[in-house]
Image: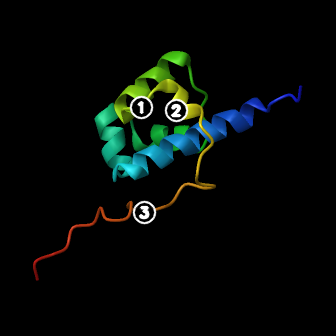
Amino acid sequence: MKREDPAQIVRNIGLRIAELREARGWTRETFAERLGVSTRYLARLEAGRQNFTVHRLAWLAEHLRVRVVDLFAPPGIKAIRVGRPPGSRTRSKA
């Protein structure tokens, strides 16, 4: 059996978290506020530069309203988008 790269697993989980967050229309700032963490910490999680404990995975899954196993699904994105998720901007009444 081929050995899996732990660093790649962490990166994929991070991308999956970003993907699920974006699918809900949440900015990184909004989600970080909901979690009670800094945007910098969340950015490190999503970029795969911060390792996860099982407790942290369960906590994130709960806030994303998914099962922990869903965080291990292959991400549908290759990179984290910068800026607001599509449709999250409000139109001014000018």
**Horizontal and vertical percent for residue 38?**
39, 38
Q: Distance between the residues labelled 3 and 2?
A: 24 Å
Residue at 73% over, 34% down: 7
* Visual colour scheme: rainbow
Q: Residue 83 carries which label?
A: 3
**In the picture shown, does residue 59 fall above or below 35?**
above
Q: What residue type is labelled 2?
A: Asp
- Left or right, residue 89 beside residue 2: left
Q: What residue type is labelled 3?
A: Gly
**In the picture shown, does residue 76 fall above or below 37?**
below
Labels 1 and 2 touching (C-beta < 8 A): yes
Mark 3 or 1: in front is 1
Residue at 58% over, 51% down: 76
Q: Which mark is residue 29?
A: none
**Horizontal and vertical percent for residue 9?**
69, 34
Q: Mark 1 points at which residue?
A: 66
Q: How far apart are marks 1 and 2 (CA)?
A: 6 Å
The earlier-in-sequence mark between 3 and 1 is 1
Which quarter shows the C terminus? bottom left
* Viewer-proximal residue among 13 and 52: 13
Task: Name the secondary structure under disc 3.
Answer: loop
Q: Residue 70 carries which label?
A: 2
